[in-house]
Image (cartoon, rainbow, N blue to C red):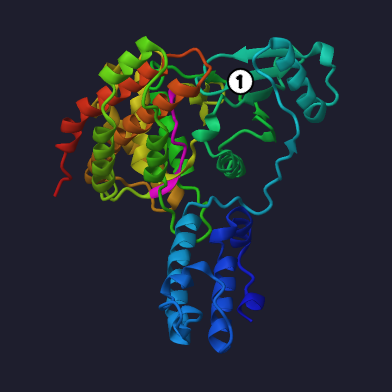
Amino acid sequence: MLRSRWRGSADERNFSREHPLLSSAAVQTWVGESAASTRSPTARPSVAPLALLRGRPGTEESTSLSAPAVLVVAVAVVVVVVSAVAWAMANYIHVPHGSPEVPKLDVTVQDQEEQRCREGALSLLQHLRPHWDPQEVTLQLFTDGITNKLIGCYVSNTMEDVVLVRIYGNKTELLVDRDEEVKSFRVLQAHGCAPQLYCTFNNGLCYEFIQGEALDPKHVCNPAIFRLIARQLAKIHAIHAHNGWIPKSNLWLKMGKYFSLIPTGFADEDLNKRFLSDIPSSQILQEEMTWMKEILSNLGSPVVLCHNDLLCKNIIYNEKQGDVQFIDYEYSGYNYLAYDIGNHFNEFAGVSDVDYSLYPDRQLQGQWLRSYLEAYKEYKGYGTEVTEKEVEILFIQVNQFALASHFFWGLWALIQAKYSTIDFDFLGYAIVRFNQYFKMKPEVTALKVPE
């Protein structure tokens, strides 16, 4: 009866298909079957955990459970499973109804050889731009990314219509949940915060090219530009994409996963020597993660839909239109609001030639955060008045969460150092991020919330 009555929301049904062992339907089925076993004197419990409460061999208790015992176990297991469902649904990104489906093409684009790469791209364009003459298609390789390869495809010099083909980097499935990336992309697109997503394929996706200039660290200090960035980030943070569930951050879960994947050494002797001498031990890293989770989780920063990777090159500025757009949503998801801003401030230092003297000073941060809060309150319908105390509280939260950003990308870079085929010194980048974490920690942890 319980099974026949359960229908569930659209989100729960989608979640059930993706996580069958944690779905509400599975819980309801389990409850119904357990309840049925209590009603029949000859029934035997069919769920494995019940065997743990069986009695001594050779007794009646060894082959069946009393009705009260079955009920107690059923309730206990249901509580655990329901808690797991609630946690998972709190991280589940709700794609708005009516959003266009994204086709998945059975095409693999080889990126090691130029000719095979072109062949794969043209196979995609047969579906996306069937009217294009393959002989006239120009492929332009973008080299700014250190995770994936990005190719622009177009047929005229004006570049009025450009299809971007992004090819996932080697082993990046260890770092990125591609299904969540597509959901985030679709949600942001539905709210006017992302370009059109044309399709996914076996090892990448295709999307619309945004006209404008990818920014450098020198640009993000410009008040005219950083106010646009603050406003756009506030718009994303104000998006309601959880369909009634109270969202929870998956930062610590993801960080724990990354920690489990970091290498213990490298085959290259010089690389291994740097790793052993300049990277903190696993014990120290684990202790720092425990400390961060305990301290930062209690700062009171709201959990919102975040970009989580707002480096300068992921910001496209269109001077003619006077706006900015963000690209690359691989790491998007629910996270602490202050983490997203702190991570962006860390990226003022750049990526290839990192210079933390470019980290925004208190005055610039104050202006940035006030612009952000005014926009965030406006989007949430709270007015636009912002107090000095609100700015100060956010300043403290942001700078303390900047520690988590350094740590996260330090772990990420260690994994990339092991697997990536892109020509970049990932180990050196990890060393820089961990060094900055330990350098910043005493200063930012001394900050206190005003009375």
Residue at 61% over, 44% down? 190
In this view, the residue in front, 70 or 279, is 70
The kind of secondary structure element at disc 1 is: strand
Dot 1 corresponds to which residue?
Answer: 150
Residue 395 visible: no
Classify residue 75 as left or right of residue 136: left
Q: Specify the farthest residue to the front.
A: 58
Rendering coords of residue 368 (x, y %): 33, 32
Number of other residues with Cα within 10 Å of mark 1, as a class: few under 14, some 14 to 19, many 20 or more: many
Rendering coords of residue 353 (x, y %): 37, 12
Asked if 271 appears above or below 399 in the picture, the reply is: above
Residue 127 within the magenta-colored segment of the rendering: no
Classify residue 85 as left or right of residue 386: right
Residue at 83% over, 20% down? 132
Rendering coords of residue 92 (x, y %): 52, 52
Classify residue 152 as left or right of residue 194: right
Classify residue 5 as left or right of residue 22: right
Q: Mark 1 belongs to which amino acid?
A: Leu
Determine which quarter of the picture holds residue 106.
top right
Q: Give the quadrant of the N terminus.
A: bottom right
Determine which quarter of the picture holds residue 273.
top left
Asked if 69 appears above or below 85 in the picture, the reply is: below
Asked if 406 appears above or below 245 in the picture, the reply is: above
Rendering coords of residue 19 (x, y %): 57, 55
Magenta segment range?
A: 303-312
In this view, the residue in front, 148 or 192, is 148
Residue at 47% over, 82% down? 65
Determine which quarter of the picture holds residue 20.
bottom right
Residue 309 within the magenta-colored segment of the rendering: yes
Count of numbered marks: 1
